Amino acid sequence: MSGPWFHVEGPDADYVRTEVENIIRTKEKNLNMDILNKYIDKIIPYERYDFGSWRGYNNDRLGTRLSKQIKALYDKEINALLIIKTKFVPIVLHHLYKPKSMIVKSARERYYINQNVLNKEKFAPDHKPKSMIVKSARERFYINQRY
């Protein structure tokens, strides 16, 4: 092919991914890299090679446009997680742990059952008959074989 190299060759997906990540990192400091990498993988997979030539890539500012797309998706998910954390979770916790909820009833039942078991153990005799003492799994096996 004839022409300058910057008209013929172009960036690969790895270069574009690192450039987009650097653009986003320079604008924001505290990023959740798992979420950011998820959207970078979604928008710029490693198999993608349609970025054009180096001249077209830089003139069209494709890196900044892709970073804006990824940042918009990232912000949307972060805002959704923030809403879940600040609005949804308190409501769910309130309904789960209010005095007449199912969780509190089951916890109350477990508490009273455990109290009864502890009270019975407190007044139970300290020793057990010799026939009840089993020292190992092998002895337990032989005892079960006899009966």
Image (cartoon, rainbow, N blue to C red):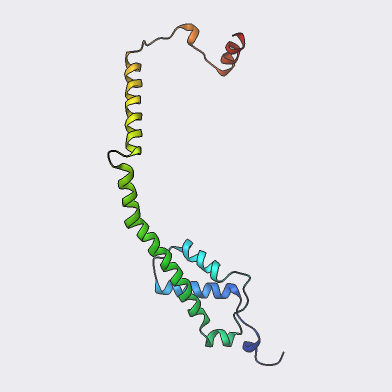
The residue that appears at 64% across and 84% down in the rendered structure is 9
The image quarter in which residue 1 lies: bottom right
Farthest right residue in view: 1
Would residue 138 be found to the left or right of residue 86 on screen? right
Q: Percent position (x, y) of residue 83?
A: 35, 60
Above or below, 124 relative to 8: above
Farthest top residue in view: 130
The image quarter in which residue 86 lies: bottom left
Q: Toward the viewer: 29 or 104?
A: 104
Q: Toward the viewer: 86 or 52?
A: 86
Q: Percent position (x, y) of residue 106?
A: 36, 33
**Number of marks in the rendered image:** 0
Quadrant housing the C terminus:
top right
The residue that appears at 56% across and 71% down in the rendered structure is 44
The residue that appears at 60% across and 12% down in the rendered structure is 142
Q: Percent position (x, y) of residue 68?
A: 46, 76
Would residue 21 be found to the left or right of residue 147 on screen? left
Farthest bottom residue in view: 3
The residue that appears at 62% across and 12% down in the rendered structure is 145
Above or below, 114 relative to 88: above
The image quarter in which residue 43 lies: bottom right
Above or below, 77 relative to 11: above
Q: Percent position (x, y) of residue 11?
A: 60, 79
